[in-house]
Image (cartoon, coloured by chain):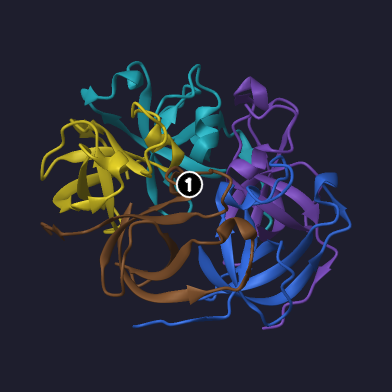
Chain colours: A purple, B cyan, C blue, D yellow, E brown
Amino acid sequence: MVIGKIIGNVWATRKDESLNGLKFMIAQLDNSEKIVVCDYIGAGIGDMVLITRGSGARQVLESQDIPIDAITIGIIDGFEDGE
Amino acid sequence: MVIGKIIGNVWATRKDESLNGLKFMIAQLDNSEKIVVCDYIGAGIGDMVLITRGSGARQVLESQDIPIDAITIGIIDGFEDGE
Amino acid sequence: MVIGKIIGNVWATRKDESLNGLKFMIAQLDNSEKIVVCDYIGAGIGDMVLITRGSGARQVLESQDIPIDAITIGIIDGFEDGE
Amino acid sequence: MVIGKIIGNVWATRKDESLNGLKFMIAQLDNSEKIVVCDYIGAGIGDMVLITRGSGARQVLESQDIPIDAITIGIIDGFEDGE
Amino acid sequence: MVIGKIIGNVWATRKDESLNGLKFMIAQLDNSEKIVVCDYIGAGIGDMVLITRGSGARQVLESQDIPIDAITIGIIDGFEDGE
């Protein structure tokens, strides 16, 4: 998983119908890369979130046929980074 | 997912027959990397699209036996990028 | 797999309920990249661990429906690096 | 998918027996990275090919138990790159 | 797949029990990145090997429940690199 900061929303009217009702947000990762995540946990702009990528991202949705590859699985309360 | 801009088409006459009828396009990502995506949503040159990669890319096709690893799942109307 | 050093913990109260009881830690990889891993093996801060990423990370949990993409599979006693 | 140029062959006598009869070639990607691909389409040195990576690479083989992670799915006739 | 050079061994006494009997080695890739591979083919230090990553790495083991993400599938006799 990676930690990301939610920095924006994405709107797409024309999309695969299996995506209706899902919310897509932009997350910025530690290495400054930006990815689009499906928000499953009710994240808002500015939240630090835990993100799962790849096939794991489809495990929490009701149907595994939904074509996503990144999802928020938690909102981070805190972390300690010993480095 | 990632956001990409459609910048070109790809033609391949000699290919796996399961690919017949699919359209392949070049998308440029935010980090300037170029990938080839299967266009599922009717994207055109210049469109900003939402792209799913990996096994998720096969979830929307009628058969999951088709050997692709990237697909357009939506055409982006807009996004806000708070950074 | 990759070798990582456990350098911190991650806390998330609001999360997918399938994650309850799992411990999440920050691991730093050889290339200095930091990822979040699910700790399956009882690792502590400072331990060098062997990490599996992708769908393989879900093979050791009781349910494969848990949305993770990285897990510790062993604590490293030693390694020789011939380079 | 990515576009690669076939630049060489790979020979391995001692290998997993499921790989017998498969041809392995070196492909150079746009970012100059070199990967080894299983050639499914009859590509030759110098050909530009379309490459699928990950689990999608196993969809075209008769058995999905063959341990490969990259395959040629088409020989490219041409592409336009608007950038 | 990628070509790697085997440069060391990894020992882990405390590990997931499904890993008992498997050998883990450090492989250095062309881009100088180091990864840990499960050795399936009897590779030794200094051997050039062909490595499959991701879910493909689990196809050759007796059980696909073993949490690995990289495996040696062949020892390379030679390759020609036209670049």
The residue under label 1 is E58
- Residue C72 pos. (x, y %): 64, 64
What residue do we see at 74% from left, 69% from top? C42
- Residue B82 pos. (x, y %): 69, 56
Q: Nearer the viewer, residue B58 or A34?
A: B58
Q: Nearer the viewer, residue C57 or A40?
A: C57
Q: Nearer the viewer, residue E78 or D46?
A: E78
Is residue D52 shown above or below E33? Answer: above
Q: Label 1: chain?
A: E
Circle 1 residues within 10 Å: few <14, some 14–19, many ≥20: many
Is residue C34 shown above or below B47? Answer: below
What residue do we see at 28% from left, 24% from top? B16
What residue do we see at 59% from left, 41% from top? A55
Does the image show residue A29?
Answer: no
On-image quarter of the C terminus of chain A = bottom right
Residue A24, quarter of the rendered image: top right
Label 1, secondary structure: give it.
Answer: helix
